[in-house]
Image (spheres, rainbow, N blue to C red):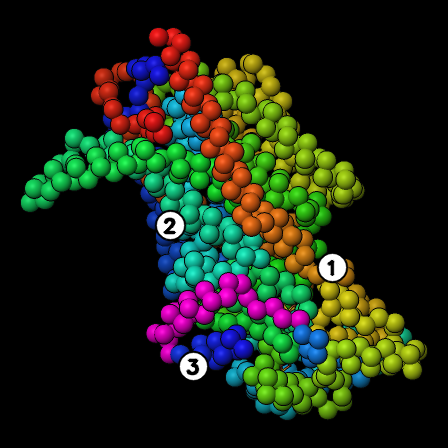
Amino acid sequence: MSRNSVLPQPIKQKFFSPGVIALIALAINGLVFLMGRFFFGIGAVTNLNNQYPWGLWIGVDVAAGVALAAGGFTTAALGHVMHREEYHAIVRPALLTAMLGYTFVAVGVFIDIGRWYFIWHPLMMWNGNSALFEVGICVMIYLTVLYIEFLPIVSERFIGRVNLPGPLASFNKISDKILRLLDRGLSKTMFIFLIAGVVLSTLHQSSLGTLMVIAGPKMHPLWQTPILPLLFLLSAVSVGFPMVIFESLLASRSLKLKPEMHILSRLGSMIAPLLGIYLAFKLGDMFIRETFVYLREFNTASVMFTIELVVGVIIPLRMFLSQKVLKSPPLLFTAASFVVFGVLLNRINNFIVAYTPPYATGSYFPSIGEISVTVGFIAMLVLAYRFVVLNFPIISVHDKYSAQPTKYSIKEVGK
Amino acid sequence: MPGKSRRDFLKNSIAGGIAATGISASVANAGPKNILSADRMGVLVDTTVCVGCRNCEWACKTAHNLDSGDLNSYEERKILESKRRPSEHALTVVNEYTHGKNSTLPVDVKVQCMHCDHPACVSACIVGAFSKQENGAVIWDTDMCIGCRYCMAACPFQIPAFEYNKAINPLIMKCDFCFDRTKEEKLPACVGICPTETLTYGPRTELIRIARERIKRDPSRYIDHIYGEYEVGGTAWMYLASKNFTELDFPLLSKNPAPGVSESIQHGIFAYFVPPVSLYALLGGIMWLSKRRKEMEGEEKI
Ligand code: SF4
Ligand code: SF4
Ligand code: SF4
C-alpha cells in the first residue's frame, strides 16, 4: 500500500458559521413541530388520514433516506470487497453518511409509527411474510453494523490520546487499553461486518421496493410492477456513487478543501453503466407491461414519471459519459445532483404520488408540520456530519496540516 | 388451540405484563395465524333488500363501546346524501346510491371489513398482529401493534382506520366480525339488529349457494355477480346487487389473492436463507481473491 500523504484527519475549523446558525434554526423549527406530534398525536401535525396512511415521513425520511445512504455499501463493496485501495479516501465519508443517514431513518420510523414505545416489537414478533418486517429487521442490524464499522475511526482518534477531564483522568490508561483491545479484535473480524453490511443492504434496499407491491391496484401502474424490488436495488446501487460525489464536493466547498477530483472522476466514470442498467430495466418493464400508454395522459403521475426518468436518469447518464463532465467539478456536481434528485423523486413517486387509495376525496400534500420535521432532520444530519468531520479522522486532506501518520485505520481491516 | 388461549391470556393480562406475554407468545409461533377453515362463516349482504335504516351502524357502535348516540337519531336520512367510509368512530357505514335495474328504490350498501380469505392485512402487518381465525373473522391484537399503518396501505378495500388524534396508544380500528360474539356462536351485532334480513350470517359455502339461487330465481332483480365470491381470492362478506358493483364504489379487483405477489417475492428472496447466504459467500470469495491479487502484486514489486 502506498503511504501517500493524504490521510484522514479531523478538519481544523470552527464549528459555527452563518450557515450552521441557519441550520440550527431549521432544526429547532422541526423539533417544535415534533413536540406537537408527541403531545397531540400524528393527526395534529400531519395531513395523513385513513385514506393516506403514509406520507412525506415514510416517503422521504425513510425510503429516500435509505436509498441516498446507499453510498455506504456501494463504496464498501468497491473499497473493501473488491479491494480497490485507490478509493479508500472516500470510504470513510461515505460510511459516515450512511451511519448518520440510517440513524435518521430509524428516527424517522420512530416518529412516524403511532406507538413508538413498541418500536422493539418486530425484534420479538416475527412475520416472515411481511416486506416491512424484513426491511425493519435488516435496517436495525445494518445500523448496528455501520456503528461497528465506524468504531475503528473512534479508536484511531483516541488511542494514545485518551484525556478524560479531572477526576476521571485515572481511567485514561484503562480506557486506552480497552480501545486498543477493541481495535485489535475488530481489525481481525471487520471483514465479517463489511460483507454483512453489503448483504444486508442489498436485502433491504430491494425489500423496500417490495413494500408497495401488496398495495396492488391502489398504486399507479406506471410504478406498480413485480420487479419493483429489483428496480429499487438497481436505483440504490446507481445513486451510491453520485451521492458520494455530491457530498464530497459539497463538503470540500463548505470546509474549503481541495476537491478530490482524481478519485471522484474515476468514480464518476462508473456511474453511467450502472445508470444504464437501471434505465434498461425501467424501460423494459414499461414496454413489457405496456404502461407507456399512461404517458399519453397529462396528469401528475405522467409528469412526475417523465421528470424522474428524463432528469433523474437519462440526462445524467449522458453527462457521465462525457470526459468534460468527469473532469469539471461544477459539471460533475450537477450530474450527480441530477441522479440524487431522480432517486429522491422516484421514492416520493412510489410512496406518495403513485399511491391512489380508492376512496380518497382529495389528494395528499404534506403539511407544514411534516415538511418542517423533514427539513429539520436534514439540517440535523448536516450539522452532525460537520461535527464529526471536524472531530474525527474522516476526510483525507493533503498534507497541509502535517497529519499524524495514523497506524490504526480501516485500511488495515481484514489482515 | 394455542392461538386462542394466547389472545385471552393477553386480554386478561394487566398493562405491565403485556410486553412479556407478547414476547413469549409470538416467539412460540413466528408469523400470524392464518387459518382457512372449510366451514368458515360469512355474511351475505343483499343490497336489494336494505332500506338504509342504519340500525346496523348503531348496533355496531354499541357493541364496540363507541359513541353511538340515540337509535332514533339514525332515522335522519340527510346523512345518506354524502358518501362515508368506515373509520375509527364507526366500523361500518351505509351509503346510498341511485336505483338499479327494474326498480325505482335507491340502493343502500353497508360497508365494513370484507374479512378476506387471503387477507392483505394479515400478510402485511410487520409484527403479525392480524390473524385470520377459524370462524372466518380477521381480527388483530392491539397489544402487538406498533402503529406503522402498513395494514392500511395494504388493504385492497382501504378498511383499517387509525386514531390519528391520539398521542398515546392510538389504535387500528376496523370491523372485527364481532369476534367476541361470533366465537360464542352468537350473531354479529349488525346482523342481529337488521330488520329486513339484508344480512344473512352463515357458513360461506352455504351463503354462496343461497346467493346463486336468489340470482337464478329472480334474474330481473339481480345482476349476475356475487361480489366477494372470487375478488382477491374470496371474502367472507359477499354482496348481491341490482347494478354494477363499480357503480356502488366497490373496487374492481382480480381473482388473485392480494398478498400473492409480494409473498412470493419475499419467499423467493428468503428461500431458507439460501440467497442471502450465497451472496455472503460470493462477496467473501471476491474479497479474499482481490486481497490475494493485491498481495501478489505487492510481492512482485519487492
Ligand atoms: S378487507 Fe382489508 S382489513 Fe379486511 S380482511 Fe381484507 S385486507 Fe384485511
Ligand atoms: S399498524 Fe399495527 S396492525 Fe397495522 S400493520 Fe402496523 S403493526 Fe400491524
Ligand atoms: S360484524 Fe360486528 S364489527 Fe362488523 S360491522 Fe357488524 S357489528 Fe360491526
Say if B59 sits above or below A251 in the image: below
Image quadrant holding the N terminus of chain A, namely: top left
Q: Which residue is drawn at 54% across and 77% down?
A: B1
Q: Please tell me whether mark 1 sits on a helix, a strand or a loop.
A: loop
Measure the C-alpha gap from mark 2 to mark 3: 43 Å
Image quadrant holding the C terminus of chain A, namely: top left
Q: Name the residue under label 2.
A: A29
Say if B100 sits above or below A302 in the image: below
Q: Please tell me whether mark 2 sits on a helix, a strand or a loop.
A: helix
Residue B12's label in the rendered image is 3
Q: Give the range drawn in magenta.
A: B14-36
Reply yes or no: does residue B22 show up in magenta.
Answer: yes
The amino acid on which the numbered mark 2 sits, given as a three-letter code, is Asn
The answer to whether residue A117 of the structure is visible from this angle is yes
Q: Position of residue A116 (x, y in %)?
A: 41, 61
Q: Residue at x 63, y 37 (%)?
A: A308
Say if B254 sits above or below A174 in the image: below
